[in-house]
Image: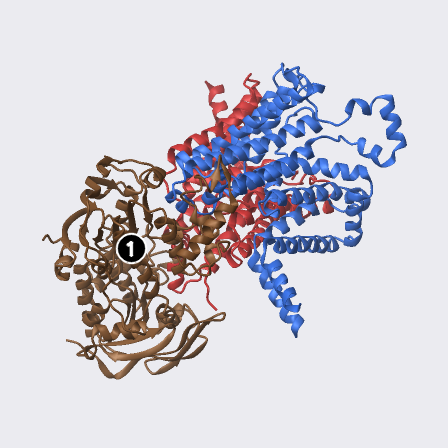
Amino acid sequence: MEALIKDIGFIIGTTLMYSTPLIFTSLGGVVTERSGVINIGLEGMMFFGAFVGAAVAYYSQNPWWGFVSAGLGGALLGLIHAIACVTFAAEQIVSGIAINFLGSGLALFLSRLFFDGATQTLTIPKKIPLPFSFLFGEGKLFKTAGFMDLVFNRFATVYLAFLLVAVVWFVLYKTKIGMRVQAVGEHPEAVDTLGISVYKIRYGAVMMSGLFAGFGGAAMSIAVVSRFSNTLISGHGFIALAAMIFGKWKPQGAMLACLLFGGAKGVEIFLGAKGFPVPSSLLAMLPYILTIIVLVGIVGKTTPPAAIGKIFDKTNS
Amino acid sequence: MNLDREALKSKFLNGSLGLTLISIALGFLLGALILLMAGFNPLEAYWVILKGIFSRSKYVSYVIIYATPLIITGLSVAFALRTGLFNIGAEGQYIVGAIMAAAAGYFFKLPLILHVTLAVGLAVIAGAIWGGLAGYIKARFGVHEVISTIMLNWIALYLSNFVVTLSAFGSQGTGKSYAIQSTARINLLSDWKISEAGIEFIRNHKILGDILKTPVNAGFIFAILLAVLVWYILNKTTLGYELRAVGFNPHAAEAGGINVKKSMVYSMVISGGLAGIAGALQVLGVSHRIAKLAAMEGYGFDGIAVSLIGNNTGAGSVLAGLLFGSLKYGGSKIQDAMQAPTEVINIMIGTIILFVAMPKLIRLILTILEKRAKN
Amino acid sequence: MHLTTIDFSQKSVEMIDVVKKFGDFVANDRIRLSVHKGEVHSLLGENGAGKTTLVNCLYGLYRPTEGRILIKGREVTISDPTVAIQLGIGMVHQHFMLVEPFTVTQNIILGRETTKMMGILDLSTAERKVAEISEHYGLAINPRDKIEDISVGSQQRVEILKALYRGAEILILDEPTAVLTPPEIQELVGIIRNLTQEGKSIIIITHKLHEIKQVADYCTIIRRGKYIDTVEVDKVTEMDLASMMVGREVSFAVEKTEQEKGELALAIQDLVVKDNRGIPAVNGLDLELHKGEILGIAGVDGNGQSELVEALTGLRKVDSGVISLHGKEITGSTPKDVINKWNIRTIPDDRQKRGLVLEFDVAENLILETYHDVPFSNRGVLNMEEIYAYGDSCTEKFDIRPSNPYLVAKSLSGGNQQKVIIAREVNNDPEVLIASQPTRGLDVGAIEYVHTALVNQRDRGKAVLLISFELDEVMNVSDRIAVIFEGKIVGVVDAKDVDEHEIGLMMAGGTR
């Protein structure tokens, strides 16, 4: 019985850890798409963020500098995406593809420059801390490797991700700026006629999505693992994008979808560790199959923001 | 005379070819800038790349081998795009094509032509199913193809990683499938190359011998034929007419009696089939087996770049594929020659796509330059 | 009734010699406009005459290239809508600027949000204020309703409320009656009266002459971007206004000879068709269309017209009921069968969305419904020579300009784009021609061309079904008129002995 509870604790804990990078990035997707700009460049932003986070954390010996820099790096790519899509009316998916090439290209280019020609960074000296570690251990409130330890003794990024879900939800639905972001995603011309700048809001939203995706990358490279490598991100940004749509463009929905993907990873790792004779590849495939099935079920009953992907061109001179 | 030149100039600059060439130039410019900032001599780097592409016939051969799958996945993406569908899933369709080709190449024992036809045919079917599935759930349920193909890519990747663990297909623990039969290989003169006469020939003929040292194969011929086929279907057939109409304006196409949903499925079936061929040719001509994938190999994603730079046409995909293949192969040389990161190529490709996506910006730059020139 | 509320001592708006250029194109060429406090001023002009451009300059959406704007006697530069709003200018756009999933209150406060600390919305305070203003002007709006759930008339009142919430003294209404039923129009007239009594100035853009006569004090006429005149409405006739607008004498009547209608062509019985939300938009509709007649369907937008056309063309599922052609049931046919098997052709209401593939050239657009037939293709392979030869003959026969089948459809003018569609639909000699809003957005010359094409078709003994929201058009072109209301035909009358008021009443749901 105790072993079973421990197992469940292990699965929940790993689920939380692997969901975290996805949640950050997926929230970035929510913010930009609610403002009407598709961003399939999340992958590149996450990739770049993962590198910047690890590189800065390595050189500054402070993971938090790494985390913040990763966000700024992502936001920089967001700025490029915004310039292309918002100011120069680029096709948003095409620009996103370009961002993916730029993000991975820049990350690997800089990695080779700063880490002796390698496409991975060295191991960082300090990972993101475990903020509640003081509660766990011999003679503490909870014992080591117990259920509570396995579930709650997690990196600060895990807590930050869930906090950010609440913040994004609150800002989007309860504040002035959130209402404006939603309005821009639904009917930019209406917003324009009221004297609010559609461009400024979209710039803000797209850069914010880069910021969050950058955080997502760092949550991978300096918390889940302790270095950046060229295969570290490999598609997580795309999964976060799918999770955002799966979650019907809502922060809370995106979070749940990310937990599903993270959960599949958690189960996969658990079964691997226990040496179950289930091929890990087939197991890893499951969440993707499930996503397609669920999307087939829900699409049509959910509507994306009305102005999504459409170019807003204010022919004002 | 002067007027003609003006007209020609405006046609060039407003046409897609002009914009693409300017975008490519800007991509090279930015690449140079980045190399310069990183402390490398960009002219030297570009010279190394250029030499790495053209200085030996062996290099040119490699460039073509690199470019072949990119051209075909480029054609795949371009075909779907002309119907208004963004096939991010060429990657997965490529993978299932490769699986089928590797399986057919290993399990069957047939004469050469038949064996190759069977392997490619099965790969086409697998790719077509993978692509058609995305087309079908878009047509039937309205699930955006970008999302469904991303999912299908991962399913394909894990499927590939699963099948290489099967004991009938690959030796355990190596993470590789068994090599395909020699009758399924499309390499040119591969037996003769290792015969005494062949070795003798390679030693004596510098240029041809150099080429023969590379895994020369018939893939590129396939790529060219497929480009012609894509061009023909799109521009000369009623099917192509329907698909283009749907791509430009599905509402008008529907009102005109065209079955839009069927067109979406057809388009993705053909697009997927093409990507499947790319995977098959890579197995039959270069790798001769499949192996466990730690991450996406990127042929499908690079195909998106090829398609976009090639303006989503058959000929454009061939040229863009060759450009991309050259840069990828030639670009790898600057690492050893001057320790300059080869990934500057990815940055250049990304920049080119970004500029291709912004004709508005390029026109703006041109008008500013023109005003400057006048003053 | 007119002029009584005008305060001639105060000019609220004065636009002097306003010029607006888009590149080389001059949209407004030295236009003057002067509006007093408490005045209703109408701007009259054809489609594309430059009315909307002018008011967009006033509202700060465009910057005039030249000219001066004075608000309450003070010269101003209106660089963007924020400035316009601060100056007390409000605008109700033709296409409503409302966020559908938002509530009335959210839409109204957007950009002027009432907040507690740190930008947190305070919706209840806002709702109270919105309710107050609504009551004051008799707008009857519930601040908590969602926009997607309320009627078009209510949405328009929300737009007016939005301007009033921002303290508008000058209110611009762009084509406000286009989407309203006759009773709703009367309500709007009442609201306009309330507003002028409060000293507000109203600028109303329209091309409907009797509405100008009914509501406006003064009228400024614009033609092809040029200022023509400003007149006191009570001193001119509708005919005068029309000829000033068009620049020549216009006859409202369409020339056509008397003709006996022939045998029954298209019959619709008890048709039910659901809209996108699953609500029956066509709800038990009966209609009979004969050979050799033009049957006009009159009605306000949103009473099931588009669903009816989509059902007839096979684009929308028929829920129940029977459609038959020459006595043969054709219900549930695919669009392709409707076109190619039954030879029912359609001029769609939105030519750029449904009618043309704008990126295709003219010849390619002309074969959109026949590309699969010989001679345009054979066994799936296109025959380019035949396609462009056909394009050549059509551009000549239908006077499509420029007469070049290789031109991309996008580059043609609206009128010539419509000619391409007419060529495609008419040249195959259809049994039934459905013309849905065939003159929308066209200028007078092109409108005449379209009407003539419809009459020709009728004269050749074919059946024509005309659907239009412009009552004038329906009355001028049709032989018989059927009035549609809430998805049903509420009355069919002969066009010869028709009474406009009676039709207006039926359009609003009154029975004959």
**Residue sitting farthest toward the left:** C512
**Is B347 left or right of B50, judged from the image as shown?**
left
Q: Is residue C455 above or below residue C316?
A: below
Near-viewer residue (C26 or B345): C26
Q: In the picture, one chain is red; tell me its letter.
A: A
Q: In the picture, one chain is blue; tell me its letter.
A: B
Q: Place residue C245 in its image quadrant.
A: bottom left
**Image quadrant where one finds the N terminus of chain C:** bottom left
Near-viewer residue (C348 or C170): C348
**Which residue was labeled with disc 1?**
C456
**Is C138 left or right of B287, judged from the image as shown?**
left
Q: Please, what is the three-letter code of the amino acid marked with disc 1?
A: Asn
Chain ID of residue with mark 1: C
Query: Residue at coordinates 45% horizontally, 37% vertically from top-left?
Result: B263
**Is B241 left or right of B331, judged from the image as shown?**
left
Q: Is residue C413 above or below residue A77?
A: below
Rendered hue of chain C is: brown
- Residue C276, horizontal then vertical, whole percent: 30, 43
- Residue C330, horizontal then vertical, whole percent: 27, 36
Query: Residue at coordinates 64% horizontally, 26% vertically from top-left?
Result: B292
Q: Residues within 10 Å of mark 1 (few under 14, many from 20)?
A: some
Q: Place residue A134 in its image quadrant.
A: top right
**Is B194 left or right of C247, judged from the image as shown?**
right
Q: Answer whether residue A10 is visible to the viewer in this image.
A: no
Q: Which colour scheme appears in the figure?
A: by chain
Near-viewer residue (C321 or B167): C321
Q: Answer whether residue C56 is visible to the viewer in this image.
A: yes
- Residue C424, horizontal then vertical, whole percent: 39, 49
Number of numbered callouts drawn:
1
Q: Is residue C53 above or below residue B83?
A: below
- Residue A75, horizontal then vertical, whole percent: 56, 52
Disc 1 is placed on an element classified as helix
